[in-house]
């Protein structure tokens, strides 16, 4: 009973010391519950069976990621607990002086851990319940689901999972605390406050040289990864990552060595108020946390890129779906032996009369010529790239192109005699350069020149994002003798409502299954049905997966970075208490002391964030060079949302660190 009372009073008395610990625990539990309750929260959503399967896959992936998240949070909580244990060394010494043995102290710590666990689990789950309702609305918006049947739901499965995972973490904390207490002595506890982190003075000149070298290596790494993406090898990418990491370490290692020397040259600024004390404190903090600040900077870089990319991918899929998926259905029949049967006839044999199911339709053929290849068209533009090979380019007749654009409701560009157009929205820079160079092509003895210097960004195939890798449009007579390699049939359903659309869709799918089942000799293996409904659901699933993973990992990494800096900052404040006492004795006002602490804390949090922002600018540019091949562009468009999240979580840790630090140094 006495241990219970002492533990309760300890927590109540040291609430300010536990502020960051509680903030991390509660927020971690809330986020863990919210993401693991998605399956239950989405039960009321009016979504199709296909979408439910996609959502189930997302839940399974998030469950696997949750193990990684739990490990990160567990290590973070253990680290935070170590800080609290350090703060209480003299308290434990008093207990031992009063006659308490190590077993009784361990029992006291177990009781406190149980208290903290119950309080944080309760508060975290309550916040998680509210957060999960927001996740329900967010999930519904991602899947464009019906929320008319929405009601408040508590996920028992997620609660049990959260309790088990964090229960294991608390058990680990108890075991670690017991191990620490069992290995301490009274004399060590009494003199623990006299032990400081060892600091090695750095030569300013050497530090300046290391900084310049680090900055130069970093600039070279940026240059390597932001060049032509098609020329980058895996070794180049790995090398750039290693150079970036090492140069980041060099920058943080050197900055504390010559920063103070530079400030000393600014005597009017350095010796004003207590700036000398402030700048020496900043230099000391950086000097003792070089490796940690490097890791935090790199984690912030990953966080910013992950959050920005996940939201940008979602926005790209949502924006491009209506732009590139402009019909209800499309069947593509490809055959290396030549197209010898009409798509309408194939479906009619399986009780699917496309004439009666569709309100408007068009079909056309795709042609190839052995002399019209990517390497021929891009001659002199690119070398040794995936685009520069002997693969034949698709070609289509002008009349077919005009009919398809009429169905899509898009404007038409007419082709002149002896000219060609290129329809493309991927790697268009290469095609544009080829047209600017007036590269000619030869089709069946006819030489054609580009009609314009830019590609036409219009879809041919139904898609959720840009995926046209280059199709030539020429005059009809040019392809009279060319080989037909595919037929493309496109149309819109003869339906006025969602129910009729799904009924037609089901008939087409049933016919497609019969075609596959009845053709064991693979006559129609190249026949593929794409529908707007299927493409939309796949698009939503991919964008939702990236969004959930980006949010989950990004938020947890932000928690880790903020907590690590906060705990280190408070630990430094504890070690610096005698220095602040001296400042007060010589007459420094409390306002100036608080201002000094604010500058120290702000600089401590700002330095890794600023370098991470610089990393992310070039990192996202590198990512854009690759994602453009998948039609994903403008990854920086989500910087605003990312900035808000960083400001709320990372800024929240800064605020707690500063205000808690003010109390500590008093």
Image (cartoon, rainbow, N blue to C red):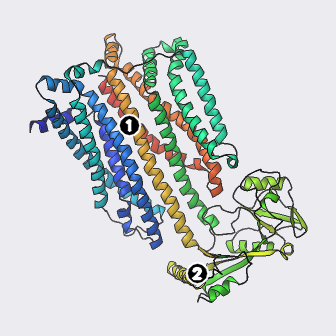
Identify the secondary structure beneath mark 1.
Answer: helix
Percent from the top left, x then y, of residue 577? 31, 20
- Residue at horizontal 32 percent and vertical 36 percent from the top: 80
Q: Quadrant of the C terminus?
A: top left
* SS class, disc 2: helix
Q: Position of residue 660 (x, y in %)?
A: 32, 30
Residue denoted by label 1: 563
Q: Is residue 156 left or right of residue 92?
A: right
Q: Find residue 463 and report its horizontal and vertical position in percent.
A: 62, 66
> Do residues under tags 2 and 1 come within 8 Å of each other at their CB atoms?
no
Q: Quadrant of residue 18?
A: top left
Residue 310: tell me if it is visible.
yes
Left of 60 or right of it: where is 378?
right
Quarter residue 600 falls in: top left
Q: Is residue 4 above or below residue 511?
A: above
| Cα distance between the residues tagged 2 and 1 | 57 Å
Name the residue beneath numbered marker 2.
Answer: 516
Q: Quadrant of residue 187?
A: top left
The label shown at residue 574 is none
The furthest residue to the front = 521
Which of the pair 427/71 is nearer the observer? 71
Q: Is residue 504 above or below residue 120?
A: below
At which x and y percent is residue 6? 14, 34
Residue that extends furthest to the top in the rendered view of this protein: 586
- Identify the mark nearer the N-term, 2 or 1: 2
Residue at x-position 61% and y-position 26%: 213
Please say whether residue 154 is visible from this viewpoint.
no
């Amino acid at each position: 009973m006495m241990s219970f009372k002492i533990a309760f009073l300890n927590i109540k008395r040291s609430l300010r010391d536990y502020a960051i610990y509680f903030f991390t625990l509660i927020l971690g539990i809330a986020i863990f519950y919210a993401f693991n309750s998605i399956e239950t929260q989405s039960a009321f959503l009016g979504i199709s069976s296909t979408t439910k399967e996609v959502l189930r896959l997302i839940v399974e992936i998030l469950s696997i990621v949750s193990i990684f998240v739990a490990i990160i949070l567990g290590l973070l909580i253990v680290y935070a607990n170590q800080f609290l244990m350090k703060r209480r060394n003299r308290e434990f010494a008093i207990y031992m002086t009063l006659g308490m043995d190590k077993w009784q102290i361990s029992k006291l710590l177990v009781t406190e851990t149980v208290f903290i666990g119950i309080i944080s689990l309760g508060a975290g789950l309550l916040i998680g319940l509210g957060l999960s309702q927001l996740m329900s609305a967010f999930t519904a918006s991602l899947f464009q689901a019906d929320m008319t049947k929405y009601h408040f739901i508590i996920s028992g499965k997620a609660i049990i999972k959260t309790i088990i995972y964090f229960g294991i973490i608390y058990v680990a904390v108890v075991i670690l605390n017991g191990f620490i207490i069992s290995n301490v002595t009274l004399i060590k506890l009494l003199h623990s406050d006299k032990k400081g982190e060892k600091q090695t003075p750095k030569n300013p000149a050497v530090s300046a040289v290391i900084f310049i070298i680090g900055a130069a290596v970093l600039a070279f790494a940026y240059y390597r990864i932001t060049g032509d993406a098609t020329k980058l090898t895996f070794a180049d990418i790995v090398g750039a990552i290693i150079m970036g990491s090492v140069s980041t370490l060099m920058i943080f290692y050197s900055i504390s060595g010559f920063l103070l020397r530079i400030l000393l040259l600014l005597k009017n600024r350095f010796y004003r108020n207590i700036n000398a004390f402030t700048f020496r404190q900043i230099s000391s903090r950086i000097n003792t946390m070089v490796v940690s600040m490097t890791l935090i900077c790199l984690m912030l870089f990953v966080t910013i890129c992950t959050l920005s990319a996940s939201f940008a991918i979602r926005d790209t899929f949502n924006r491009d779906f209506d732009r590139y998926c402009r019909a209800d259905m499309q069947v593509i029949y490809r055959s290396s032996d030549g197209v010898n049967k009409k798509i309408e006839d194939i479906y009619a044999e399986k009780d699917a009369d496309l004439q009666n199911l569709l309100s408007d339709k068009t079909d056309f053929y795709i042609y190839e010529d052995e002399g019209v290849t990517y390497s021929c068209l891009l001659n002199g533009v690119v070398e040794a790239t995936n685009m520069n090979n002997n693969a034949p380019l698709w070609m289509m007749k002008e009349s077919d192109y005009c009919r398809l654009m009429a169905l899509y409701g898009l404007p038409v560009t007419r082709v002149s005699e002896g000219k060609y157009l290129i329809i493309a929205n991927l790697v268009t820079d290469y095609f544009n350069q080829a047209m600017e160079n007036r590269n000619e092509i030869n089709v069946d003895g006819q030489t054609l020149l580009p009609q314009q210097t830019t590609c036409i960004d219009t879809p041919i195939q139904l898609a959720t994002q840009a995926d046209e890798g280059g199709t030539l449009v020429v005059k009809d007579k040019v392809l009279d003798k060319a080989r037909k390699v595919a037929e493309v049939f496109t149309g819109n359903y003869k339906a006025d409502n969602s129910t009729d659309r799904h009924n037609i869709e089901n008939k087409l799918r049933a016919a497609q299954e019969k075609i596959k089942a009845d053709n064991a000799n693979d006559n129609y293996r190249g026949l593929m049905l794409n529908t707007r409904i299927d493409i939309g659901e796949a698009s939503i699933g991919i964008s939702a997966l990236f969004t959930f993973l980006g949010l989950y990992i990004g938020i947890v990494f932000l928690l880790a970075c903020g907590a690590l800096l906060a705990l280190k900052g408070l630990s430094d404040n504890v070690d610096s208490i005698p220095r602040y006492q001296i400042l007060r004795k010589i007459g420094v006002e409390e306002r100036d002391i608080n201002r000094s602490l604010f500058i120290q804390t702000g600089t401590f949090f700002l330095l890794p964030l600023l370098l991470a922002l610089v990393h992310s600018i070039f990192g996202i540019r590198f990512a854009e060079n690759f994602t453009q091949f998948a039609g994903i562009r403008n990854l920086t468009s989500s910087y605003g949302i990312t900035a808000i999240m960083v400001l709320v979580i990372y800024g929240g840790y800064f605020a707690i660190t500063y205000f808690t630090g003010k109390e500590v140094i008093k």
